Image (cartoon, rainbow, N blue to C red):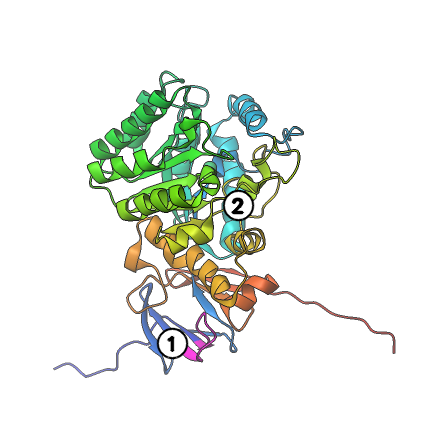
Amino acid sequence: MTTPSSPPPPDVVLRDARLPDGSGPVDITVDDGRITAIGTSTTATTVIDCSGDAVIPGLIEPHLHLDKALLDAEEPNPDGTLAAAIEITGRLKAAFTRESVAERAGRLLEQAVTHGTTVIRAQPDVDPIVGLTGLEAMLALRESYADLVDLQVVAFPQEGILRSPGTEDLLVEGLRAGADVVGGCSYQEATLDECREHVDRVFALAERFGVPVDIHADLADDTSDPRYALAEHIADRTRAHGMGGRVTVGHMTSLASLVPDARKRVLGELADAGVAVVVLPMTDMHLGGRNDEVNVRRGIAPVRALLDAGVRTGLSSNNVRNAFTPFGIADVLDVALFLAQTSHLAGPDDMARLVTMATDDAAAIVGRGDRHGLHVGADADLVVLAAPNATEALLARADRRYVLKRGRVVATTERTVQLHRRR
Ligand SMILES: [Zn+2]
């Protein structure tokens, strides 16, 4: 005969928490790595006192070049252009070792986690210069940092496919080795036909390996060069391969130049085909408009128009402290604030939407769907902000008091600031 006993308490309760919009307070119960209740609670093995601060889902970096991070100490880019960035980085990566990549990437990854990032889609270069060194370093980090962050690895052909013979074989090798996503970099090809061929080969690899697509489509100021007007071709290929919801384009800054009729048509095609756009404002604005002598263009994809057209839209850091982007701290909320300031997105609804872009929308982009979010059943990837709601956190650059990955506290920040008045 067994003696009835009460079930063990849940693992964690986040007590006295507010929801991202400031409503609440509620208690968020976590058991076995997942959210099991949002409401009231009794007790738990670990109680985290949120003292009325807001909790948001874990932040996501859907587009981060971890392999090239923090290279500014080795060689900065005084010219500041995209061409110089590719040239300098091409030289530096010839000397990459798995250890050197892992050391820099690990430092940035840890920094991202302290800022509340729980999922990263990394974009290591794959080409005859660096081979699979960066990708293999990422695959190793995916295992060694699995307690802190879910890392997705893109096999990314930064130097192009047709203009860089040998790359396609390396992409195949990388996908066989376990890359999660096939990347593209169509703007590197010499002609419009070759850009289209590049896109077609990327989709063929996606179909062969059953993986999503993530293409660097362009970093151009406008579409006067037809190589930078590939949105409709990518939408068409997405439909043809039945890959709606599994295709992302990064940067695609040329979209900002489209006049209203063309914009309506092109964005409508992206929305209809299920192609997501990730904007990388810190890089895009830094590299864009370099030939404009007056009224320098901002170089950022038109976020409000994308959202209004129903295109799934995310944001990310892209590069941090290297020849492409000399700044950044791998903080998605910092990127969101920059986007608010540079894209006329500062209304109350806009601010809340920016946080959703950095969490729920990014989760859809990287294929996590319902596993992510502030709802029962989702992974307990959560961030306690030092602010009463998400908008205030964005504006005040609030600390991330607690970061939880699958219910375990993986980072904490406590800041003491004192003012010393003369009495
Ligand atoms: Zn990029």
Disc 1 target residue: 44
**Observer-nearest residue: 324 or 338?**
338
Quadrant in the picture for the N terminus: bottom left
Is 392 above or below relative to 232? below
Q: Magenta span covers which residues?
A: 15-26
SS majority, magenta? loop
**Observer-nearest residue: 147 or 210?**
210
Disc 2 target residue: 281
Quadrant in the picture for the C terminus: bottom right
Q: Position of residue 312 (x, y in %)?
A: 36, 51
Residue at figure coordinates x 30%, y 69% from the top left = 376
In contact (CB < 8 Å): disc 2 and disc 1: no
Is residue 25 found inside the magenta-colored segment of the image?
A: yes
Instruction: Farthest residue to the top: give it.
Output: 165
Q: Nearer the viewer, mark 2 or mark 1?
A: 2
Instruction: Farthest residue to the left: give it.
Output: 1
